[in-house]
Image (spheres, helix red, strand yellow):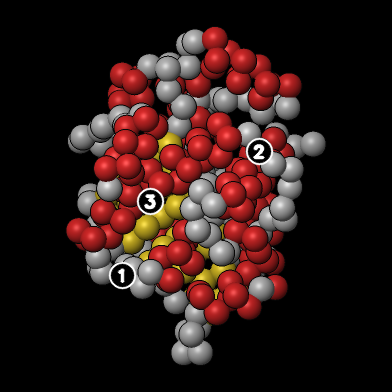
Amino acid sequence: MSDEDPVIQTNLDAALSKRDAVTKGYWHDPYIQYFVKATERKTPEISRGYYARVQGIKMLLDKFLKVCGPECQVVNLGAGFDTLFWRLMDEKAQFKSLVEVDLPAVTTRKCYYIRLRKQLLKGIATEDDDVRVSASDLHAGHYHLVGCDLRELDVFEAKVVHESGLDLKLPTMFIAECVLVYMSCEESSALLSWITRNFPNAVLVSYDPVNMGDKFAEVMVENLKQRNCLLAGLQACTTIKAQEERHCFSHCYVLLLPSCKRAQCQK
């Protein structure tokens, strides 16, 4: 088993939990079924947690697109089997490009599923679009899926910027949904510094644990250790202040899940 295998497994765990929550009616997602099969039912606590997680990111992304679209870009770091692009297409959202990045082992599977399912394939390209596909990468119209390690910044830049045709000057939202915590603080700092240096109009939405000093956190960390899944970036998740200070952006705000739930209820 490679060092990447436990992290790759977290993508499958998240996708299965999201499919279960969708099956229960927490939110609508007709595309998740094409990436993972139905599995055992999760607890209500897990389903509610994923609901808040998904809706919190949706709320911030939709606001970004409303303010900055159509001349804007989205980069989904550690995208896994995320179905965000197809939701945006169904909603006729306006943006220039959406790039999904994950380890090649993950993007290879995603490429396979996209090519296998016409429901996915028809969403990413029209007859006039040039579709380029390799084992782990796919480029078509507004959609780009690239396989690379976020720690290898030279490869990351080549694939995300040059091969995907991103414009460094355009407003760009980077999404990191439970990603940075699996990188060491040095590695995530290098990635965040690269983003702020190269994208002057960038915004980052990062979903990661916080206040990781209590008993609940200890149990969670120990459970992950038993699965050989280490949270290399745990040091940056000890407090809210630590999370704020780890980012390289001019402004940083921490929004806890209860706040996301209240915002959705008010909406």
Label located before the other in sequence (3 or 1): 3
Q: Quadrant of the N terminus?
A: top right
In terms of secondary structure, where does tag 2 sit? Answer: loop
Q: Residue at x 41, y 65 (%)?
A: 88
Please give the name of the residue rendered at 45% of the width and 46% of the height, measured from the top-left corner.
Answer: 54
N-term mark: 2 or 3: 2
- What's the amino acid at mark 2? Lys
Query: How far, Cα to Cα, is label 3 from label 1?
Result: 15 Å
CA gap, disc 2 and disc 3: 22 Å
Q: Residues within 10 Å of mark 3 (few under 14, many from 20)?
A: few
Residue of label 2: 42
Real-space Cα separation, disc 1 to disc 2, in angstroms: 35 Å
Give how far across and how far down residue 78 sits, in percent: 52, 47
Could one spot residue 20 in this view of the protein? yes
Which label was assigned to residue 94?
A: 1
- Say which of 212 and 43 sits in front: 43
| Residue type, numbered disc 3 | Lys
Please state the horizontal and vertical placement of residue 216, each as a whole percent of the image.
55, 15
Residue 101 in sight in this render: no
* In the image: residue 82, left or right of residue 109: left
Q: Nearer the viewer, residue 167 or 66?
A: 66
